[in-house]
Amino acid sequence: MKRIVSILFFLSGLVSLTCCGGGGRAASTDGDTVYMPRYASGFMVTETDGGRVLEIIDPWQGAEGVRYRIFLSREGASAPEGFEGITVAVPLEKVVCMSSSYVAFIDELGRASTIKGISGGKYISDPGVRAAFREGKISEVGYDSGLDYELLAAIRPDAVFAYGLTGENSVMSSKLAELGIKVIYIGDYVEQSPLGKAEWLVAFGYLYQLEEQAVERFEKTVRSYNALKELIADNIGQEQRPVVMLNSPYRDTWFVPGDGNYMVRLVEDAGGRYACAGEDSPQTRPISLEEAYVKMLSSDIWLNPGQAVDLAGVKAENPRFISSPPLAGGRVYNNNNRTTPEGGSDFWESGAVRPDAVLTDLVKIFHPGLLADNENLYYYRKLE
């Protein structure tokens, strides 16, 4: 349910930005670089005549050479003549979020009160945002083809934070452009580095004129994450690293991520060995149940087994794997320790901003006793 809910948000991709050509990660199309991310690949901030520009780069899977430019207008400043992109007044005061992770980024900056519309409000985990949603202070704007344009026109947000799966939806773009609604693509879901996802906090910081606060908060996360990585590197040898299986079967197929995937990197940074390693790609690929069975026999731990809440449920859904070491030894963990009654998952929400907290959970799971507090998991739970 966690990933399914997240995908529902993905399906709500909206665009009304003007796309600039050029491509290339290293250089800006205009002006000096103000902020070049250390881990993220999908944005940068440059200086141009009269102000700063947030540049969004390749914000969906498969995008190559796609660049959107947003002029950040402070105190009514105008974009320079001939500027190709959109202009938004900052700091933003009213926004609509099409993904739960955007809610987490904004809340991390203390600006959740600016959220006036949301897609999938009942799936949001943040307590303050859930309360505002129940009280009618935040509106449900719908999904994809069911988007409520009338409501969006009434909200008149400064920006809609959105994304797409494979590209621009021109029908939605046209409707939103007619309403004068500006949409900003956020490409955090494309990032495969855990710290790369988290660094999008800085992009939001520039949109809220809180860039210094955002950088400071992100650097704190970097220090925490890297300290855990170093602890593993200094204390855990290769032979001490458990073999970890990910995900669960869908019908007769098991979808597993490639070695460059976000979740695989977390497993490796936490001192685990990925059971299905060998594909140098971030993309998910299908394997047969027969191949999955062989991988499970060599695994020590099973993470993220679908919607399961207990071992009985896992065994009922996967009877052929009952004798595998993770199930036989009771070392099965799911990332649904923090969920809403409707099935929304905080793992896909605040976990994007706090990869150090996710990593802490995994270190506790893989290497009991290495950390002082080994009992309390935040995003994960051991299935009993």
Image (cartoon, rainbow, N blue to C red):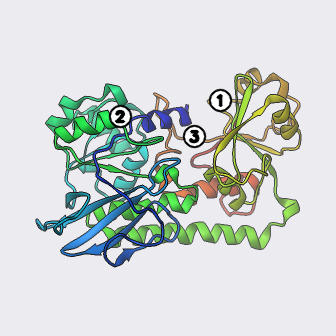
Residue drawn at x 34%, y 38% is: 130
Q: Label 3, on which residue?
A: 337
Q: Amino acid at mark 3?
A: Asn
3D distance between C-alphas at marks 1 and 3 = 11 Å
Instruction: Point out the tag, 1 or 3, that comes first from the N-terminus.
Output: 1
Residue mark closest to the camera, 2 vs 3: 2
Is label 2 in contact with label 1 (beta carbons under 8 Å)?
A: no
Q: Secondary structure at mark 3?
A: loop
Q: Is residue 122 above or below residue 298?
A: above
Q: Position of residue 256 (x, y in %)?
A: 70, 40
Q: Label 2, on which residue?
A: 121
- Splitting the image into 4 quarters, where does residue 142 fall? top left
Is 361 positioned to the left or the right of 323 in the image?
left
Instruction: Point out the tag, 2 or 1, that comes first from the N-terminus.
Output: 2
Q: Secondary structure at mark 1?
A: loop
3D distance between C-alphas at marks 2 and 3 = 19 Å
Q: Secondary structure at mark 2?
A: helix
Q: Label 1, on which residue?
A: 308
Q: Position of residue 242 (x, y in %)?
A: 82, 53
Instruction: Point out the tag, 2 or 3, that comes first from the N-terminus.
Output: 2
Residue drawn at x 38%, y 71% is: 28
Is 295 positioned to the left or the right of 51 in the image?
right
Q: Nearer the viewer, residue 351 or 154?
A: 154
